[in-house]
């Protein structure tokens, strides 16, 4: 699928993730209340056929970095 949902389960975390990723050069879209219930907040990570594997890998590294920064991802995995 070209759109990959990354669940944040928190409106504030979804908005923080969007802001920090934008600062890292990665554009994602937040989906927060009232579009979804607060506990279902997410960001939409969109891919296109024109993205290279290098670009995808860089984006994943930056997503992981930011997720750890805001406490969505811990050393052992997803924090929830």
Image (cartoon, rainbow, N blue to C red):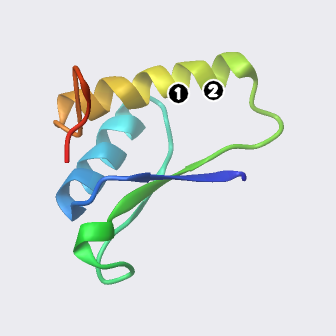
Q: Locate residue 58, reporting x and y percent.
A: 54, 19
Q: Locate residue 39, reporting x and y percent.
A: 24, 69
| Circle 2 SS class | helix
Point out which mark residue 24 bears.
none
In which quarter of the view is residue 57 placed? top right
- In 3D space, how far apart are the residues under numbered discs 1 and 2 (Cα atoms)? 5 Å
Label 1: which residue?
Answer: 59
47 to 39, vertically: above or below: above
Determine the residue located farthest toward the front in the rendered image.
76
Neighbourhood count class around disc 1 (C-alpha, 10 Å): few under 14, some 14–19, many 20 upward? some
From the viewer's perspective, tell me whether residue 79 is left or right of residue 20: left
Neighbourhood count class around disc 2 (C-alpha, 10 Å): few under 14, some 14–19, many 20 upward? few
Determine the residue located farthest toward the bottom in the rendered image.
34
Q: Locate residue 43, reporting x and y percent.
A: 42, 55
Determine the residue located farthest toward the top in the rendered image.
54
From the viewer's perspective, tell me whether residue 74 is left or right of residue 34: left
- Could you tell me if the residues under marks 1 and 2 are in contact, i.e. CB atoms within 8 Å? yes
22 to 33, vertically: above or below: above
Q: Residue at x 75, y 31 (%)?
A: 51
From the viewer's perspective, tell me whether residue 38 is left or right of residue 2: left
Q: Nearer the viewer, residue 20 or 75?
A: 75
In which quarter of the view is residue 21 placed? top left
| Circle 1 SS class | helix
Q: How many numbered discs sit on the rendered protein?
A: 2
Q: Residue at x 23, y 40 (%)?
A: 72
70 to 52, vertically: above or below: below
In which quarter of the view is residue 33 placed? bottom left
Q: Locate residue 67, reporting x and y percent.
A: 29, 34
Q: Residue at x 41, y 39 (%)?
A: 22
From the viewer's perspective, tell me whether residue 80 is left or right of residue 40: left
Q: Residue at x 24, y 23 (%)?
A: 76
Label 2: which residue?
Answer: 56
């Amino acid at each position: 699928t070209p759109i990959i949902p990354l669940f944040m389960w928190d409106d504030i975390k979804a908005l923080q993730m969007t802001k920090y990723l934008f600062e890292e050069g990665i554009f994602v879209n937040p989906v927060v209340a009232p579009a979804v219930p607060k506990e279902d907040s997410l960001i939409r990570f969109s891919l296109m056929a024109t993205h290279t594997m290098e670009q995808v890998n860089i984006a994943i590294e930056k997503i992981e970095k930011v997720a750890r920064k805001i406490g969505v991802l811990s050393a052992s995995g997803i924090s929830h």
